[in-house]
Amino acid sequence: MIRLRARRQRLYTLGFSADGRFLAGAGAGKTVTVWDVRTPGARSRRFSAGEEALRYVLLGFLRDGRVVGVTGGERSVVLSDPAYRRADPVPGAPPASFAAALSPDRSRVYTVAKRMRCLQLDPDPAEVWSTEPPDPGGSFLQVCVSPDGARLAACCFVPGGGPLVVVGWDAATGRSQGLIGTTTAPFYEMLWSADGRHILARRVWDLVVWDAATGRQLPGPRKNLAELPVRCLAFHPGGRVLAAGGPDGQVHLVDADAWQVVRTLQWDVGHVGAVAFAPDGLTAAAGGSETILVWDVAE
């Protein structure tokens, strides 16, 4: 196990590089810290998104190793330099983003606010498409991408007090593919499982899960995990295990077939605000108040 320090930050966002060597983390401020988790004693590196930056809604590594950060601030999408010493705004990025998702091939980012946008980041930044929500008076609240990169699922606000809708979209073109499901409360997080079977959404404390193929809402998560304090989620790359962290300082590992907690890890990090798995599934990380723990999943 490795214990990392994040100076004066409560961690809300974590992301591993494609090879699992580097881990990026950020809290509510403008600073992103990058750690080399495979080199003992290696110094962390830090960069800033600028004074306008708010809480990061996404941190991810591109194929070339640079870090992309998406925030709710005016510089909503930024790219680091390869040495992780500075970050520059992406031209043509939207002025603010509620949420974002990185494509599985780590070349594109999808952002949502009043519109949903697809930005090509590698090799050169460019907007690929932009689309409105199903109701022109509405807005997008959350987005996630399927593991094959072909589809998006987005939660949309509909004016007039009706239920929120979850709609499928073609990731290549931005065309709507129809309704997936509805919900009565806003989402704070959306994930598509790595095996492609489930679309999961976190509301304030409870979880809603749909079958990605049929749109059927599964009863198991709400029934079995109703008492679980959840503030952050991550699917293992195998798709069968969900990590859920919360204010009790614990990380719960959930069987994504039975939707039962199979293991609880008590980490001395305070409020767990972010969890992440490395792409190879061998390493995981949990971020709390100024502390990140990185551990071997097999332990």
Image: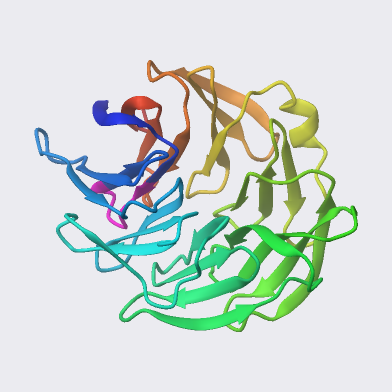
Magenta residue check for 24: no
Left or right position of 277 against 182: left
Between 196 and 14, the one lying in front of the other is 14
Look at the image and tell me whether residue 5 can be seen.
yes
The vertical placement of 150 against 191, above or below, is: below
Question: Is residue 275 placed above or below 201 in the rendered structure?
Answer: above
Camera-side residue of 187 and 160: 160
Decide if residue 38 is on the left or right side of residue 139. left
Look at the image and tell me in which quarter the N terminus lies: top left
The quadrant in which residue 244 appears is top right
Q: Position of residue 210 (x, y in %)?
A: 76, 51
Q: Position of residue 35 (x, y in %)?
A: 22, 42
- In the figure, residue 202 lies in which quadrant? top right
The residue sitting at 33% across, 65% down in the picture is 62
Residue 52 position in % (x across, y down): 39, 53
> From the viewer's perspective, is 25 left or right of 92?
left
Q: Position of residue 32 (x, y in %)?
A: 30, 46
For the magenta stretch, what is the residue range? 15-22
Q: Is residue 214 left or right of residue 297?
A: right
Please determine whether, in this image, residue 80 is positioned above or below residue 29.
below
